[in-house]
Image (cartoon, helix red, strand yellow):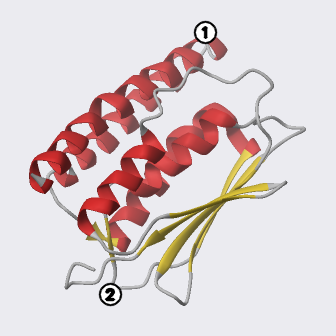
Amino acid sequence: MIESQLAALKAQINPHFLFNSFNTLITIIDENAMQPEVAIEYVEKLSDFYRSILQYREQESISLEEEWELVQSFVYLLEKRYGTNLTLHIDTPPKDGFIMPMTLQMLVENAVKHNIISEKYPLDLYITVDADDYVTVRNTLQPKSKAEPSTQFGLDSIIRRYQLLSERKVIIEKTSDAFIVRIPIIKKSGT
């Protein structure tokens, strides 16, 4: 039953990501109508990124190094839209830890979706590794005045996936100026 639930959650990740990517592509086309090469480059990078997703999607976990590469590729795609108004600050990943695929990407995606990103209000994202075997994703909190429609899939999916595969919980905290999610690092034994 747990394997069936996990498979169902994994199956939802790809359409969710693709839906949001198409929305980003529409924005890039609108903002760069006289420069089609910007959209072409985005589609090429998106294709490479999606290929990586397909490679990892069936795995229960991937190394932190692989997940770091995925999230950095994803942020590269976002930088095409937001330029220097979006900044990723990221630690070097430990070599002995694992994480569920697409976890960090979904958290970055949620931060972008729910916060203002502009020259006046740049969005800073921090991905750090804590001493107690958690990966922390923190972003500055600057909510949009009008919330975008949400499927409520991203964060809920992460929480449910970890409930199925680990005894350690995902920790969520919201302060007056930051949104913080702590993800347990999975060791080879699966905990």
- Amino acid carrying label 2: it is Asp
> Quick one: which residue is furthest to the bottom in this view?
131
Residue at (66% x, 35% y) in the render: 114
Task: Give percent across and percent down for residue 178.
Answer: 76, 56
Alpha carbon separation for disc pair 1 and 2: 45 Å
Left or right of 171: which side holds 179? right
- Where does label 2 land, which residue? 96
Task: Give percent across and percent down for residue 182.
Answer: 54, 68
How packed is label 2: few (under 14 Cα within 10 Å), some, or many (20 or more)? Answer: few
Residue at (46% x, 27% y) in the render: 151
Mark 1 or mark 2: which comes first in sequence? 1
- Amino acid carrying label 1: it is Ala
Q: Is residue 33 above or below residue 10?
A: above
Foreground pick, 158 / 81? 158
Residue at (28% x, 83% y) in the render: 187
Give the mark toward the camera: 1 or 2.
2
Task: Give percent across and percent down for residue 83.
Answer: 69, 39
Q: Is residue 156 above or below residue 163?
A: above
Q: Quadrant of residue 112?
A: top right
- Where does label 1 land, which residue? 33
Image marks 1 and 2: residues in contact by CB distance under 8 Å: no
Q: Quadrant of residue 168?
A: bottom left
Task: Give percent across and percent down for residue 109.
Answer: 53, 42
Residue at (45% x, 78% y) in the render: 93
Foreground pick, 61 / 47? 61
